[in-house]
């Protein structure tokens, strides 16, 4: 498999290159899937988080706001990790609210 530099990945995403998008998915999705699965999520959750992460990265690239101070892999992982933590917090908040309601039903 061909490996691309961080600069090539960023430029490929900017240009919406099919090759780069496929590379990013093949190379980095398994890491995000592992993160989500190991922390109570499903494969579908992982796909959603990965897609949302790619959209965020693409938006940063498109608006010339992306400044990599780490590898692209680390940056994408951090974005997806933060998205997953936010989703877990929302789930916990909903669960806590449901638990509170159940107390009154007994």
Image (cartoon, rainbow, N blue to C red):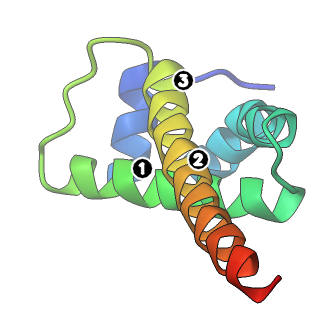
Q: Quadrant of the N terminus?
A: top right
Q: Residues within 10 Å of mark 1 (few under 14, many from 20)?
A: many
Camera-side residue of 16 and 104: 104
Residue 106, located in which quarter of the rendered image? bottom right
Residue that numbered label 3 is attached to:
73
User: Counting residues from the N terminus, which is met first, the one under dot 3 or under dot 1?
Assistant: 1
Position of 63 with respect to 7 (left or right) is: left
Camera-side residue of 2 and 69: 69
Residue that numbered label 1 is attached to:
13
x then y, percent, for residue 103: 72, 74
In front: mark 3 or mark 1? 3
Identify which residue is drawn at 62% across, 56% down: 92
Q: Looking at the picture, does residue 34 appear above or below residue 61?
A: above
In front: mark 1 or mark 2? 2
x then y, percent, for residue 89: 54, 51
User: Counting residues from the N terminus, which is met first, the one under dot 2 or under dot 3?
Assistant: 3
Identify which residue is drawn at 27% across, 58% down: 59
Identify which residue is drawn at 24% across, 49% down: 60
x then y, percent, for residue 10: 37, 37
* Marks 3 and 1, how far apart at CA: 14 Å
- Could you tell me how many numbered marks the image carries? 3
* Marks 1 and 2, how far apart at CA: 22 Å
x then y, percent, for residue 96: 62, 62
Identify which residue is drawn at 36% across, 55% down: 56
Camera-side residue of 38 and 67: 38
* Marks 2 and 3, how far apart at CA: 16 Å
Q: Looking at the picture, does residue 74 appear above or below residue 50?
A: above
**SS of the residue at dot 2?**
helix
Residue 102, located in which quarter of the rendered image? bottom right
Do labels 1 and 2 touch, CB within 8 Å? no
Is residue 15 in view? no
| Dot label at residue 84 | 2
């Amino acid at each position: 498999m061909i490996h691309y530099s961080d600069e090539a990945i960023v430029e490929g995403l900017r240009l919406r290159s099919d090759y780069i998008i496929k590379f990013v998915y093949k190379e980095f999705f398994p890491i995000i899937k592992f993160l989500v699965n190991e922390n109570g999520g499903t494969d579908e959750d992982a796909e959603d988080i990965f897609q949302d992460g790619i959209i965020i990265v693409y938006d940063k690239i498109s608006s010339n706001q992306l400044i990599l101070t780490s590898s692209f892999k680390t940056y994408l992982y951090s974005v997806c990790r933060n998205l997953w933590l936010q989703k877990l917090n929302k789930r916990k908040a909903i669960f806590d609210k449901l638990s509170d309601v159940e107390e009154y039903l007994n």
